Image (cartoon, rainbow, N blue to C red):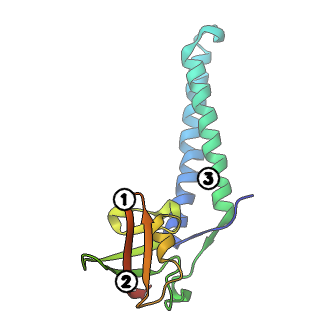
Amino acid sequence: MSSPAYYTEEGYKKLVDELNRLKTVERPHISQQIADARDKGDLSENAEYHAAKEEQGLLEARIAKLEEVVANARIIDDTQVDTSRVYIHTRVMVRHVENKSEREFMIVAESEADVRLGKISVTSPIGKGLLGKARGEVAEVTTPAGTTRFEIIEISR
C-alpha cells in the first residue's frame, strides 16, 4: 500500500477524470481492437492481436496504478494550510541570494507539478529544500547544477 499523497481539489479531480477516461473510453476501444484482430483468423501469427493484447496489459497496469493513487489521495483544504512555514500547497516567494532575482513557487504533489506554471513537486530538490522554512530563512538547495541559496521572502496560500 502506498503512503498518502496530498492534492488540491483540482489535482484530485484531474486524477479521477483520467481514471474514468481510461476505464470508459480506452478500455472499450482496446477490447474492440482485440475483437477485430481475433476475427482475422489464426492468433498465433496475428501481429495486430498481439499488439492489442500488449496495449491492453499496459492500460490495465496504468488503471491499477491510478486506482491506487486515487484510493490513497488526500485533499488539502487550502484554507487550513499553515503559512508560517513552507508546506505542501503553499505559495512561496524566494530571492536567489547570489543574483537577487525573485521567483514564486507553489509546492504541490508530484503529479500536479508543472514548472511552467511555477508548481514544483514537494519531492523535487527545490521543494525539499524549501519545506519547513520560515519567512526570512535561507534555504540551501542542492540540484544537479550545483548548490543554490534562496531567501524566503513571503509564504501564502
Q: Which residue is tagged 1? A: 145
Question: Closer to us: mark 1 or mark 2?
Answer: 1
The front one of 1 and 71 is: 1
Q: CA distance from mark 3 to mark 2?
A: 37 Å
Q: First in sequence: mark 1 or mark 2?
A: 1
Q: SS at mark 1?
A: loop
Quadrant for the N terminus in the image = bottom right
Residue type at mark 2 is Glu
* Image spot of residue 156 (x, y percent): 42, 87
Q: First in sequence: mark 1 or mark 3?
A: 3
For the point 32% across and 62% down, the residue is 116
Q: First in sequence: mark 3 or mark 2?
A: 3
* Image spot of residue 128 (x, y percent): 51, 71
Residue type at mark 3 is Leu
Is 143 placed above or below 155 here?
above
Is 111 placed above or below 10 here?
above
Q: Which residue is tagged 2? A: 151
Q: CA distance from mark 1 to mark 3?
A: 33 Å
Q: Which residue is tagged 3? A: 66
